[in-house]
Image (cartoon, helix red, strand yellow):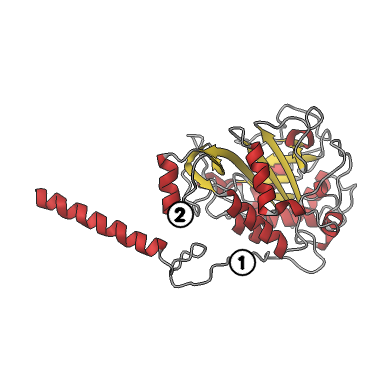
Amino acid sequence: MCKFIGCILCLGALGAAGFCAWRFGPWYNQDSGDPTNTSNEPTFTALNTCDGCCNGLVSNCERKINDVLIPMVHNAHSSKADLFLAYNNNKDAEEALVAGYRGLMLDSCMCDGSIGETIQSLWKGEMPEGYYMAFCHGTCDAGIREPMELLGNIKKFLDTNRNEVLIIEFEIRENSLVELYKAIDNSGLDEYVFRSDSTDISEWPTLQSLIDANSRLLLFAHGDGMESCTTMSCPEGLFYTYDHFQQTNWNDNTCNLKGNPTPSERGFLLMNHWINNERDLPSEKNAKEFNTFDSLLKRFKLCKERLPSVVAVDFWDVGDVLSFVKEVNLNRGGGDTTAAEAIAHTQGK
């Protein structure tokens, strides 16, 4: 019996050693997962773009940023590809940007090198030290994204695609605001950040004006350390989310607003378009139904007074989100086009 147990332990050790040799050897390429692929640089060139386009369409260019429907990834840092537990997405945030998503929701938190974090980091060939800021979902033990990697890759995307405008919405956890702000600066993303002299913006710029000024990144944040910028001095380039956003509920299929403010009260209307499972965890099964063209159309038709500016989803690679967004933006017409008219034209497709 002892010999049998010894053999099992030996085989386990050999297997672990073999995995480490494959995983951390010079032939392994983290981006492709293919040990024969020696290319270390992922592709950041956006799909479905064109010369003279703004976020994929020429007709978007002269519209204000809040009059264009922006597809956004909920908890974009949390993915199966990045080895998260209870992940919100199959594929990573970088692939979402390339595919056509122009908004990311990211949660910042402080990590302390717990056993769970250490195992995750070793598995990915990383080893952050001490007390550090990362992007996590609820707890660092469930998975993390390194800020310099993710923010650096977002910068590479903006470097590569000069006609694309992005929105990032941060949820600040565990008083990580100062470290997040440092990470944004250190990544070089700050060169693209849109800044305003006023905290009360009644008229948002057009996509073309943001592109011309090369201020193609709008940053919003809420959570620990962030309050209304009318009552505190917000970090330069960071807008307080709820100064400018209204939102619908998640786990919901109506257009009812959280807090029931009037639909025109703030610049952006965010539709939180995902439904968790019975354990309140992300559900790919639900996304397969909720992310379809028909499901999106049905819910948008309930927004009688105003069309959402942003639609945020889980499992971004599932369903018809990008094709739906494109059809809505193609049919928005001028600034006097009503939500009902835009949706009616989209339905006709």
Q: Name the side, left or right, on which 160 lies relative to 202.
A: left
Q: Name the side, left or right, on which 92 lies relative to 347.
A: left
* Residue 124 numbered mark, or none: 2
Residue 86 can be seen in this image: no
Give the mark toward the camera: 2 or 1. 2
User: The residue under label 1 is which amino acid type?
Assistant: Thr
Seen at 65% across and 31% down, the residue is 224
In the rendered structure, which disc, 2 or 1, sits on the residue that comes first in sequence? 1
Residue identified by numbered label 1: 43
Residue 193 on image: x %, y %? 77, 50
Camera-side residue of 305 and 66:
66
Quadrant of the frame with the C terminus:
bottom right
Residue 232 can be seen in this image: yes
Secondary structure beneath dot 1 equals loop
Residue 5 versus residue 52 in the image, above or below: above
Q: Name the side, left or right, on which 257 lies relative to 109.
A: right
Secondary structure beneath dot 2 equals loop
Residue 241 on image: x %, y %? 73, 37
Residue 283 versus residue 3 in the image, above or below: above
Seen at 76% across and 39% down, the residue is 239
* Residue 113 numbered mark, or none: none
Label 2–label 1 contact, CB within 8 A = no
Camera-side residue of 115 and 343:
115
User: The residue under label 2 is which amino acid type?
Assistant: Lys
Q: CA distance from mark 2 to mark 1?
A: 20 Å
Q: Place residue 26 in its image quadrant.
A: bottom left
Camera-side residue of 336 and 95:
95
Seen at 89% across and 43% down, the residue is 203
Residue 90 on image: x %, y %? 52, 53
